[in-house]
């Protein structure tokens, strides 16, 4: 019985010591892996297809929102400064938009989405730090590969009007710089994990698109073949621009790697 009491006492001391050893503090947490997700109202509207689907086609459907997921690592550079490097995938909500002649005749359906692969870096400046929670502001930049896919299904009337195939797909690609700023709040939740909520603004306009592969395109009053690598233009010969930026809200989980000592 005496031996059992000793063993229980030793076990309690070990558990207490272990718990004390795992007390979380930002100042002792230099490196973390993170997962982040964001969502926001889209500014793309119908710009991915409205002016590149024939001059006599009209659409009423707009893209509603953008969303993203990101993974990466964060490093503490000083008492209040952190550096974050990650890879983000951003996408517009996929939409099937119906194009008409502006009256009662349907010409086509367009299944459209825009996707960005966006390696990026950010700096976070923390304040109101309690050791287990903090507010922060951040600013960052990325260099994204943006791809727009428009898959067309034409009605008999649409195919006849534009002298076009019943089905075809356009894929555009461009690489663009983008920037973001915002503010957030991070708090310890368990073990070595923190949770953050933030809000910000992206500056992310994509232009200078080229065709990713040879295909058919409807421009102006008719359809024609386009080559891979050719510059994408709209019905008037202008280069289309998509605004993937705007306001967003995000959440993030950081998994801090305990120090070796």
Image (cartoon, rainbow, N blue to C red):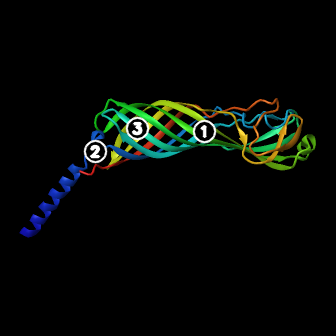
Above or below, comparing residue 52 to residue 159 in the picture: above
Q: Which mark is residue 224?
A: none
Mark 3 and mark 1 in contact (Cβ < 8 Å)? no
Residue found at x 38% / y 46%: 32
Looking at the image, tell me whether mark 2 or mark 3 is earlier in sequence order. 2
Report x, y in % for residue 10.
Answer: 13, 61
- Please name the residue that numbered disc 1 is placed on: 66
Q: Residues within 10 Å of mark 2 (few under 14, many from 20)?
A: many
Q: Residues within 10 Å of mark 1 (few under 14, many from 20)?
A: many
| Quadrant of residue 210 within the rendered picture | top right
Above or below, comparing residue 123 to residue 32 in the picture: above
- Please name the residue that numbered disc 2 is placed on: 24
Front one among 33 and 207: 207
Q: Marks 1/3: CA distance?
A: 25 Å
Report x, y in % for residue 77.
Answer: 34, 37
Q: Marks 2/3: CA distance?
A: 20 Å
State which quarter of the image contains the N terminus.
bottom left
Q: Element under label 1? A: strand
Query: 159 left or right of 260?
Result: right
Q: Which mark is residue 83?
A: 3
Looking at the image, tell me whether mark 2 or mark 1 is earlier in sequence order. 2
Q: Judge whether residue 92 can be spotted in this image.
A: no
Residue found at x 6% / y 68%: 2
Query: 218 left or right of 176?
Result: right
Report x, y in % for residue 119.
Answer: 53, 42
| Nearer to us: label 2 or label 3 | 3
Front one among 253 and 202: 202
């Amino acid at each position: 019985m005496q031996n059992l009491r000793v063993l229980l006492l030793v076990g309690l001391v070990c558990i207490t010591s272990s718990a004390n050893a795992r007390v979380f503090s930002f100042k002792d947490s230099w490196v973390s892996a993170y997962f982040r997700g964001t969502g926001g109202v889209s500014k793309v509207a119908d710009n991915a297809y409205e002016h590149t689907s024939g001059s006599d086609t009209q659409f009423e459907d707009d893209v509603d929102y953008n969303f993203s997921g990101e993974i990466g690592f964060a490093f503490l550079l000083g008492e209040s400064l952190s550096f974050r490097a990650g890879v983000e995938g951003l996408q517009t909500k996929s939409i099937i938009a119906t194009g008409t002649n502006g009256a009662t005749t349907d010409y086509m359906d367009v299944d459209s989405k825009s996707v960005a692969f966006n390696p990026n870096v950010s700096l976070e400046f923390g304040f109101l730090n309690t050791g287990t929670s903090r507010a922060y502001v951040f600013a960052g930049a990325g260099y994204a590969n943006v791809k727009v896919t428009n898959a067309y299904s034409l009605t008999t009337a649409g195919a006849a009007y534009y002298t076009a195939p019943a089905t075809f797909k356009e894929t555009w690609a461009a690489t663009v710089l983008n920037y973001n700023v915002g503010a957030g709040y991070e708090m310890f939740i368990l073990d070595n994990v923190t949770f953050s909520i933030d809000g910000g603004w992206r500056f992310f306009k994509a232009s200078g698109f080229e065709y990713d592969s040879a295909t058919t395109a409807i421009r102006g009053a008719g359809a024609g073949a386009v080559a891979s690598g050719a510059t994408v233009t709209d019905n008037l010969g202008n280069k289309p621009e998509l605004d993937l930026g705007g306001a967003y809200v995000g959440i993030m989980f950081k998994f801090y790697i305990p120090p070796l000592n």
